[in-house]
Amino acid sequence: MAKRKLTRSENMSRIRSRNTKPELQLRRALWAEGCRYRLHYDLPGRPDVVFLGDRLAVFVDGCFWHGCPIHYSAPRTREDFWKSKLRKNVTRDFTADDALVSAGWRVIRVWEHELRRIDEVVARILSTLGRGNKTYHAEPPFVTNIAESSAQYGSVQPREIIETPRWICNCGSKDIRILSVNGHGSLRPNSRHRPESAELICRECRNIWCVKVSGGPEID
Ligand SMILES: [Zn+2]
Ligand SMILES: [Zn+2]
């Protein structure tokens, strides 16, 4: 079948889907700070913002698509489809990070939800660039230390009861992602539906934990 030329509006909608709102928000804020950068430069994972001279790649990760431990909500239907979709996305992010780092790049991944405090995000990027004159205020301490674990990437530890979705890894990293979820719902303590269990992965040390979610769904 011959390839049809895209109409203008189709073309525009494709452009819009790439230049998503959170990304634009971050770019505007960086621009206002005098940062000059490249967009969607041809690098592994197609970073959203690229500082070519500084070899810094910045991604804005959507909370749903990239497994935010606070906001990921496993859909009720097509459980297997979403499960494998999430795992694929998160794994792809790690692969891109590895490729970038081994090519001498630094990688910053920003959660979409972090853009609510965009000053802190900009400060973090500026200080990574060595241009920080603002102090980066870290988030308040997380309450849950993920279980002691020597598990390596790819293995699964015994289940842990978890009371809260705010995590810190034993390595000190708070950069935790959801790799997969059994059942539907989210890990937020106040959520109406909670999955039975979830696999979490630390972006720094790559340990994976399988956690049993306490409480479980209140209804059903
Ligand atoms: Zn989030
Ligand atoms: Zn870790």
Image: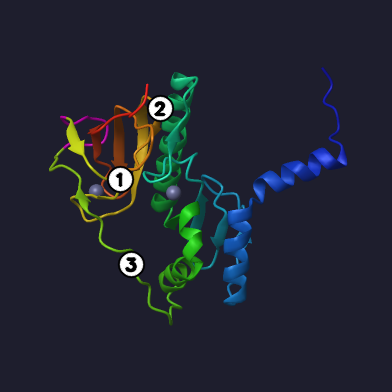
Q: Is mark 1 within 8 Å of ligand 1?
A: no
Q: Label 2 vs label 3: CA separation?
A: 31 Å
Within-10-Å neighbours for mark 1: few <14, some 14–19, many 20+: some
Badge 2 amino acid: His
Left or right of 183: which side holds 213?
Answer: left
Q: Secondary structure at mark 2?
A: loop
Query: Dot 1: what SS?
Result: loop
Dividing the picture into quarters, in which one does residue 159 lie? top left
Q: Which residue is mark 3?
A: 138
Residue at image point 63% right, 54% down:
21
Which quadrant is the N terminus positioned in?
A: top right
Of 115 and 126, nearer the camera is 115
Q: Outermost residue, top direction?
A: 1
Residue 184: mark in rendering:
2
Q: Magenta segment: does it hold 152?
A: yes
At a point 47% along the width and 26% down the height, the residue shown is: 82
Drawn side of residue 188 relative to residue 113, left or right: left
Q: Amino acid at mark 1?
A: Pro
> 74 left or right of 157?
right
The answer to whether 56 is drawn above or below residue 203 in the figure is below
Q: Residues within 10 Å of mark 3 (few under 14, many from 20)?
A: few
Boundaries of the magenta span = 151-158
Other-residue count near label 2 (Cα within 10 Å), few / some / many at <14 / 14–19 / ≥20: some
- Residue 115 on image: x %, y %: 50, 60
Residue with the mark numbered 1: 165
Give percent across and percent down for residue 33.
Answer: 57, 76
- Residue 191: horizontal and vertical position, in percent? 37, 39
- Image coordinates of residue 176 in percent, x first then y, are 32, 47
Front label number (3 vs 1) = 1
Query: Which quarter of the picture shows residue 178?
Result: top left
